Image: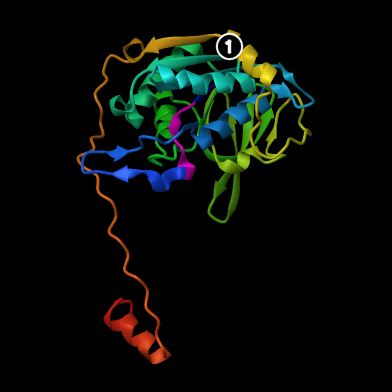
Amino acid sequence: MKILVPLKRVADPDNANKIKVSPSKIETTGLEWKPNPFDEYAVETALRLTENGANTKARLGEVVVVTFGPKETEVTLRATLATGADRAIRIDATDDQLDGDLIARALKALVEKEKPDLVLLGKQQVEGDANQVAQLLAEYLGWPQATFAGTIQSEGDKALVVGREVDGGTLKLRVTLPAVVSVDLRIVAPKSVQSMHSPAHVYSDGVRFAALMAIMASKKKPLVEMKLTDLVSDTALKIAYTGFEAPPGRKAGVKVKTVQELVAKLKTEAKVL
């Protein structure tokens, strides 16, 4: 099985309180760059689907990671190669040159070149939380799709049984390959991914980390650069940001002495009665 995994670097979501908002942009200067967490889950899922869990050094398929970004994003790609991905592609672009639709159209062209059996994506990126690219890509390709995957069971190289997280529980559906699947955080639980190579294997919870030897070896793995215009001729954006502003500050709470006073405030001030 050949799997293509789009990966995006984002400003460290654990330090979101340090982000500054100006009328013209959201300022993230000084924040550490990290892989989008949901994309990391997609990479881990791809690795599990293409290996025997008892011997994770032997890749039994191919995992290709791709990112849209400037030269420095190759650090993120190399880290992914160190965890087990086979090769990487960087599409040279900056964030202000991209929106979800353009990325989906560029990915469509890349899929037609690479011909993967499966495209695995994180359900959304934590900067914008738009949750668009997977759905747009599936539509442009005309492929079946499954979103918010919390479990995946492979049926050879023919189909996947995907447990989708929905309101009230899990909805299971079977998608034939090739397909587009976007994953949620529960996909990296110990038993969430069952590949045809090791259907009963129990993994450690979460994503894997690379050993020092693997980090050194990743420098020899293929990483190629492409231009955005190599994939799409029309680079016009469909989304334009006209301004930014922080949400209004919240008023401090007040203490009430009686139930009657509470009801009165709910009625006259909060306007909820």
Residue 95 visible in the displayed image: yes
Residue 95 screen position, x and y as percent: 33, 28
Answer with left or right where residue 239 lies relative to residue 222. Answer: left
Q: Nearer the viewer, residue 207 or 197?
A: 207
What amino acid is labelled 1 in the image?
Answer: Lys
Q: Is 82 in the magenta?
A: no
Q: Secondary structure at mark 1?
A: helix
Answer with left or right where residue 218 lies relative to residue 255. Answer: right
Residue 3 visible in the displayed image: no
Q: Is 13 in the magenta?
A: yes
Residues rendered magenta in the picture: 7-14
Residue 153 screen position, x and y as percent: 67, 33
Quadrant of res 31: top left
Badge 1 is on which residue?
219
Q: Is residue 232 above or below residue 38?
A: above
Circle count: 1
User: What is the quadrant of the C terminus in the image?
Assistant: bottom left
Q: Is residue 261 above or below residue 269?
A: below
Answer with left or right where residue 22 lies relative to residue 112. Answer: left
Q: Is residue 132 above or below residue 250?
A: above
